[in-house]
Image: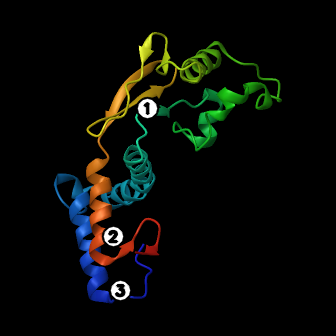
Amino acid sequence: MLVNPKFNSTTKETIINRIFDFYQVGVGANATDPNHYFYKYTEIFSIIVKTAIGTEIEAKSDLGWEDQYMYVFNYVRPQDRNLIGNSPGHGYELLYLCGLNIYTTNGNSNTTEDNLVQSNLAQIFVSFIKGQNPSTNGLSIPKITANSIPYALVSTDVTIGTTNIKPVVDFWKQLAADYQFDFLQQINL
Protein backbone atom coordinates (compact mmCIF):
# COMPACT_ATOMS: atom_id res chain seq x y z
CA MET A 1 0.00 0.00 0.00
CA LEU A 2 2.92 2.32 0.54
CA VAL A 3 4.43 2.01 -2.90
CA ASN A 4 4.49 5.72 -3.66
CA PRO A 5 8.17 6.69 -4.05
CA LYS A 6 7.53 10.11 -2.50
CA PHE A 7 7.32 8.50 0.94
CA ASN A 8 10.62 8.13 2.73
CA SER A 9 11.10 5.43 5.35
CA THR A 10 10.19 7.76 8.24
CA THR A 11 6.94 8.81 6.57
CA LYS A 12 6.11 5.19 5.75
CA GLU A 13 6.68 4.24 9.39
CA THR A 14 4.40 7.07 10.55
CA ILE A 15 1.66 5.98 8.15
CA ILE A 16 1.98 2.34 9.19
CA ASN A 17 1.74 3.34 12.86
CA ARG A 18 -1.44 5.34 12.19
CA ILE A 19 -2.98 2.33 10.43
CA PHE A 20 -1.89 -0.01 13.24
CA ASP A 21 -3.29 2.38 15.86
CA PHE A 22 -6.62 2.69 14.07
CA TYR A 23 -7.02 -1.07 13.63
CA GLN A 24 -5.55 -1.86 17.07
CA VAL A 25 -2.83 -4.09 15.64
CA GLY A 26 -0.67 -5.55 18.40
CA VAL A 27 -2.98 -4.19 21.11
CA GLY A 28 -4.98 -6.00 23.77
CA ALA A 29 -5.21 -9.54 25.06
CA ASN A 30 -5.57 -10.99 21.56
CA ALA A 31 -2.17 -9.62 20.55
CA THR A 32 -0.55 -12.74 22.03
CA ASP A 33 -2.68 -15.01 19.83
CA PRO A 34 -0.32 -16.53 17.22
CA ASN A 35 -2.86 -15.65 14.53
CA HIS A 36 -3.44 -12.05 15.72
CA TYR A 37 -1.39 -10.44 12.97
CA PHE A 38 -2.96 -12.65 10.31
CA TYR A 39 -6.44 -11.66 11.54
CA LYS A 40 -5.51 -7.98 11.52
CA TYR A 41 -3.92 -8.25 8.06
CA THR A 42 -7.11 -9.89 6.78
CA GLU A 43 -9.24 -7.25 8.49
CA ILE A 44 -7.28 -4.40 6.94
CA PHE A 45 -7.42 -5.84 3.44
CA SER A 46 -11.09 -6.80 3.68
CA ILE A 47 -11.82 -3.28 4.83
CA ILE A 48 -10.59 -2.00 1.48
CA VAL A 49 -13.72 -3.52 -0.06
CA LYS A 50 -15.92 -2.18 2.73
CA THR A 51 -14.35 1.26 2.44
CA ALA A 52 -15.00 1.26 -1.30
CA ILE A 53 -18.65 0.42 -0.60
CA GLY A 54 -18.86 3.14 2.03
CA THR A 55 -17.23 5.66 -0.31
CA GLU A 56 -19.67 4.75 -3.08
CA ILE A 57 -22.65 5.10 -0.72
CA GLU A 58 -21.39 8.49 0.45
CA ALA A 59 -20.76 9.73 -3.11
CA LYS A 60 -24.22 8.64 -4.24
CA SER A 61 -25.78 10.36 -1.22
CA ASP A 62 -23.88 13.54 -2.12
CA LEU A 63 -25.39 13.29 -5.62
CA GLY A 64 -28.89 13.05 -4.16
CA TRP A 65 -29.51 9.31 -4.35
CA GLU A 66 -32.07 8.83 -1.61
CA ASP A 67 -33.07 5.23 -2.25
CA GLN A 68 -30.01 3.13 -1.49
CA TYR A 69 -30.33 -0.39 -0.14
CA MET A 70 -27.80 -3.11 0.52
CA TYR A 71 -27.76 -6.88 0.82
CA VAL A 72 -25.05 -9.31 1.83
CA PHE A 73 -25.27 -12.80 0.39
CA ASN A 74 -24.09 -15.29 2.99
CA TYR A 75 -24.79 -18.80 1.76
CA VAL A 76 -22.66 -21.56 0.28
CA ARG A 77 -24.20 -24.77 -1.01
CA PRO A 78 -23.20 -27.73 1.20
CA GLN A 79 -21.55 -29.52 -1.73
CA ASP A 80 -19.33 -26.45 -2.36
CA ARG A 81 -18.17 -25.92 1.22
CA ASN A 82 -15.28 -28.38 0.99
CA LEU A 83 -14.05 -26.41 -2.05
CA ILE A 84 -14.55 -22.79 -1.00
CA GLY A 85 -15.39 -22.86 2.70
CA ASN A 86 -18.36 -21.18 4.34
CA SER A 87 -17.89 -17.74 2.81
CA PRO A 88 -19.34 -17.21 -0.65
CA GLY A 89 -16.97 -15.74 -3.17
CA HIS A 90 -17.60 -12.59 -5.14
CA GLY A 91 -20.56 -13.14 -7.45
CA TYR A 92 -21.57 -16.48 -5.93
CA GLU A 93 -25.15 -15.23 -5.61
CA LEU A 94 -25.36 -15.11 -9.41
CA LEU A 95 -25.99 -18.84 -9.24
CA TYR A 96 -29.25 -18.01 -7.54
CA LEU A 97 -30.17 -15.13 -9.85
CA CYS A 98 -29.23 -16.78 -13.16
CA GLY A 99 -30.43 -20.26 -12.34
CA LEU A 100 -28.66 -23.09 -10.60
CA ASN A 101 -29.14 -25.34 -13.60
CA ILE A 102 -26.02 -23.92 -15.24
CA TYR A 103 -24.07 -25.06 -12.20
CA THR A 104 -25.59 -28.45 -11.65
CA THR A 105 -24.65 -30.16 -14.91
CA ASN A 106 -23.11 -33.01 -12.94
CA GLY A 107 -26.57 -34.37 -12.22
CA ASN A 108 -27.11 -32.66 -8.86
CA SER A 109 -30.52 -31.14 -8.69
CA ASN A 110 -31.60 -28.10 -6.75
CA THR A 111 -32.32 -28.92 -3.15
CA THR A 112 -35.18 -27.52 -1.11
CA GLU A 113 -32.58 -25.35 0.61
CA ASP A 114 -31.28 -24.07 -2.76
CA ASN A 115 -34.80 -23.16 -3.78
CA LEU A 116 -35.39 -21.34 -0.48
CA VAL A 117 -32.22 -19.27 -0.81
CA GLN A 118 -33.06 -18.50 -4.44
CA SER A 119 -36.56 -17.38 -3.48
CA ASN A 120 -35.25 -15.20 -0.63
CA LEU A 121 -32.81 -13.42 -2.94
CA ALA A 122 -35.13 -13.12 -5.93
CA GLN A 123 -37.92 -11.54 -3.85
CA ILE A 124 -35.58 -8.70 -2.88
CA PHE A 125 -34.88 -7.83 -6.50
CA VAL A 126 -38.44 -8.35 -7.73
CA SER A 127 -39.92 -6.05 -5.09
CA PHE A 128 -37.31 -3.36 -5.82
CA ILE A 129 -37.86 -3.60 -9.60
CA LYS A 130 -41.60 -3.21 -9.04
CA GLY A 131 -40.88 0.12 -7.33
CA GLN A 132 -41.40 -1.09 -3.80
CA ASN A 133 -38.98 -1.15 -0.93
CA PRO A 134 -36.88 -4.27 -1.35
CA SER A 135 -38.27 -7.00 0.85
CA THR A 136 -38.50 -10.74 1.20
CA ASN A 137 -40.87 -12.88 3.24
CA GLY A 138 -42.46 -9.75 4.70
CA LEU A 139 -39.11 -8.37 5.88
CA SER A 140 -38.36 -4.93 4.41
CA ILE A 141 -34.80 -3.69 3.98
CA PRO A 142 -34.44 -0.21 5.49
CA LYS A 143 -32.92 2.59 3.40
CA ILE A 144 -29.33 3.57 3.93
CA THR A 145 -29.05 6.92 5.71
CA ALA A 146 -26.19 9.21 6.66
CA ASN A 147 -26.13 7.59 10.11
CA SER A 148 -26.97 3.96 9.36
CA ILE A 149 -26.09 1.35 6.77
CA PRO A 150 -28.61 -1.45 7.19
CA TYR A 151 -28.48 -4.52 4.98
CA ALA A 152 -30.34 -7.75 4.38
CA LEU A 153 -28.25 -10.79 5.25
CA VAL A 154 -29.48 -13.36 2.74
CA SER A 155 -29.18 -17.09 3.39
CA THR A 156 -31.77 -19.74 4.18
CA ASP A 157 -33.14 -17.07 6.51
CA VAL A 158 -33.09 -13.35 5.89
CA THR A 159 -32.21 -10.99 8.72
CA ILE A 160 -31.49 -7.29 8.90
CA GLY A 161 -28.09 -6.22 10.10
CA THR A 162 -26.35 -2.88 10.24
CA THR A 163 -22.79 -1.79 9.80
CA ASN A 164 -21.07 1.45 10.55
CA ILE A 165 -18.29 1.81 8.01
CA LYS A 166 -18.31 5.60 8.17
CA PRO A 167 -15.47 5.83 10.74
CA VAL A 168 -13.37 3.60 8.48
CA VAL A 169 -14.18 5.68 5.40
CA ASP A 170 -13.36 8.84 7.35
CA PHE A 171 -10.04 7.38 8.54
CA TRP A 172 -8.88 6.54 5.01
CA LYS A 173 -10.11 9.88 3.64
CA GLN A 174 -8.20 11.75 6.36
CA LEU A 175 -5.06 9.70 5.74
CA ALA A 176 -5.34 10.49 2.02
CA ALA A 177 -5.81 14.19 2.72
CA ASP A 178 -2.85 14.28 5.11
CA TYR A 179 -0.47 12.71 2.59
CA GLN A 180 -2.11 13.81 -0.67
CA PHE A 181 -2.28 10.18 -1.70
CA ASP A 182 -5.27 7.85 -1.90
CA PHE A 183 -3.89 4.65 -0.38
CA LEU A 184 -6.83 2.52 -1.47
CA GLN A 185 -6.78 3.59 -5.10
CA GLN A 186 -3.02 4.15 -5.15
CA ILE A 187 -3.22 7.57 -6.77
CA ASN A 188 -1.82 11.00 -5.95
CA LEU A 189 -4.39 13.63 -5.03
Position of 162 relative to 59 (above/below) = above
Q: Secondary structure at mark 3?
A: loop
Chain-order first, disc 3 or disc 2: 3
Q: Secondary structure at mark 2?
A: helix
Judge by depth and name the residue closer to the eye, 112 or 95: 95
Image position, residue 140 (x, y; %): 42, 18
Q: Nearer the viewer, mark 2 or mark 1?
A: 1
Q: Are marks 3 and 2 in contact (CB under 8 Å)?
A: no
Q: For residue 138, what is the image quadrant?
A: top left
Q: CA distance from mark 2 to mark 1?
A: 29 Å
Q: Amino acid at mark 2?
A: Ala
In the rendered image, which residue does mark 1 sit on?
Answer: 67
Q: Residues within 10 Å of mark 3 (few under 14, many from 20)?
A: few
Image position, residue 30 (x, y; %): 22, 53
Position of 6 relative to 141 (above/below) = below
Residue under the image location 62 percent in, 21 percent down: 118
In the rendered image, which residue does mark 3 sit on?
Answer: 7
Q: CA distance from mark 3 to mark 2?
A: 13 Å
Chain-order first, disc 3 or disc 1: 3
Judge by depth and name the residue closer to the eye, 33 or 156: 156
In the rendered image, which residue does mark 2 sit on?
Answer: 176
Q: Nearer the viewer, mark 3 or mark 1?
A: 1
Q: For the view shown, which residue lies furthest in the top direction?
A: 138
Q: Residues within 10 Å of mark 1 (few under 14, many from 20)?
A: few
Q: Secondary structure at mark 1?
A: loop
